[in-house]
Amino acid sequence: MAAQRTLCIVKPDAVEKRRSGAILQCIEESGFKLVALKMTHLSRGEAEGFYEVHRQRPFFGELVEFMTRSPVVIAVLERDEAVTAWRDAMGATDPAKAAAGTIRKQFGANVGENATHGSDSLDNARREIAYFFAGTEVSPTA
Ligand code: ADP
């Protein structure tokens, strides 16, 4: 199985609760390798650009306010079928509907403040990784 890379953001709610370390531990224990990692406080422009696809959605303003409220931890994760594996590990968007044991069930508060982001396709993973990381900031493929 070919290794893939996907983007993870530990969102402000989880960082504020000091759960970013616990979430990164879950990620590593689920078989992902961390190949890039940083903490940053997103500007409004960075958050709006990242979520551009959601600009027309009713929750866009709320989402940008939330994502810029305090720092986030951004990681590139590598393993076989990384995109699907990370979406599965996170669980449903709404933590109340997420399966037991998933990251959003364990660490998320509600449908907006749901602890983590994960790319939803390989094309988006490539775009999102390039949005946040220069090539020199990501470990080369082994
Ligand atoms: P996912 O992150 O599971 O791919 P979406 O792409 O639909 O979900 O939404 C992006 C993000 O927008 C969600 O992770 C969540 O933080 C926020 N969001 C989604 N739906 C709502 C909503 N109804 N109200 C507030 N925020 C929302």
Image: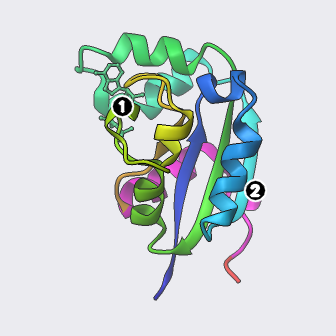
Q: Residues within 10 Å of mark 1 (few under 14, many from 20)?
A: some
Closer to the chain start, of discs 1 and 2, is 1
In the image, residue 105 above or below residue 5: above
Question: Which circle, 1 or 2, is nearer the viewer?
Answer: 1
Q: Is residue 110 magenta?
A: no
Residue ID at (58%, 31%)? 11
- Quadrant location of the C terminus in the rendered image: bottom right
Q: What x and y, as percent, mark residue 14? A: 63, 29
Report the residue marked by disc 1: 96
**Which residue is at a point 72% across and 54% down the rendered structure image?**
25
Residue type beneath disc 1: Ala
Q: Which residue is mark 2?
A: 137
Percent position of residue 37, x then y = 74, 50
Q: Across the whole image, how many numbered discs are drawn on residues?
A: 2
Q: Please state which amino acid type lies under the numbered disc 2.
A: Glu
**Foreground: 47 or 27?**
27
